[in-house]
Amino acid sequence: DAGVIQSPRHEVTEMGQEVTLRCKPISGHDYLFWYRQTMMRGLELLIYFNNNVPIDDSGMPEDRFSAKMPNASFSTLKIQPSEPRDSAVYFCASGANTEAFFGQGTRLTVV
Amino acid sequence: GIQVEQSPPDLILQEGANSTLRCNFSDSVNNLQWFHQNPWGQLINLFYIPSGTKQNGRLSATTVATERYSLLYISSSQTTDSGVYFCAVDMNTGFQKLVFGTGTRLLVSP
């Protein structure tokens, strides 16, 4: 398996624009996680899914953030409208019961 | 929520030296993982170790769950070991959400 695949790797957008981050989990994994990494707050969980169902979205910072998992092989994290404080590295991870495996991340810069 | 503290925050080693990184957590855990974030930002799985001891080459880890700490040992360090080492724990039964420590930044110089 190629591991967790995220796209794009880098995204630069203007404040107010919509941003969509994409993730393909490892085949067979039934958990999917979205994390955000910043210098100030470190790695923090935004939301996670089990069997495509959102279980806990308490880490989503505000209503501008939304996440979907329409099927077992695809998830999106959307920010609308984006703000400069959303600049961070966003990681997707997947797992099956024990270990979580991370994608390479999307570095988002909002100017 | 659960607190995860890692020490030391920064570590500088000469190539070939050994080191011990520590992770303390404030509550019982059902999941503990160690990760290495390399200079390119990639998070690499090192160990899944909620209890006991494991070894993988020059790296080994021990978790003493009853005393709420885990140790990561790096022997004969190499420059490629540089990066940030994270401990992450999940206190929930089943597989829910990992809470990350603040990391130990390691620099191995030649």
Image: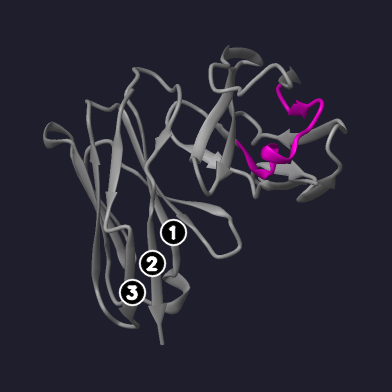
Mark toward the start of the polypeptide (1 vs 3): 3
Name the residue carrying label 2.
Answer: B106
Q: Residue at 67%, 38% (x, y): give it.
A: A85
Q: Position of residue A64 (x, y in %)?
A: 74, 21
Q: Nearer the viewer, residue B41 or A14?
A: A14
Residue A40 at x, y percent in the picture: 50, 45
Q: Earlier in the sequence, mark 2 or mark 3?
A: 3
Amino acid at pointer 1: Val
Q: Are marks 2 and 3 in contact (CB under 8 Å)?
A: yes
Quarter of the rendering containing residue A60: top right
Do the CB atoms of the residues marked 1 and 2 lie less than 8 Å apart?
A: yes
Q: In the rendering, at what x and y percent does residue B70 appear?
A: 23, 45
Judging by the rendered image, the residue that carries numbered circle 1 is: B84
Q: Are dots 2 and 3 on a single chain?
A: yes
Left or right of A75 on screen, residue B65:
left
In front: A65, or A27?
A65
| Same-chain check, marks 1 and 2 | yes
Question: Left or right: B82 with respect to A37?
Answer: left
Q: CA distance from mark 1 to mark 2?
A: 6 Å
Chain at tag 1: B
Position above or below: A99 against B8: above
- Depicted B5 relative to depicted B61: above or below: above
Q: Please tell me which residue is depicted at 37% across the width and 42% down the height of the picture.
A: B101
Q: Secondary structure at mark 3?
A: strand
Give the magenta-colored segment's residue range.
Answer: A72-92
* Residue B12: mark: 3
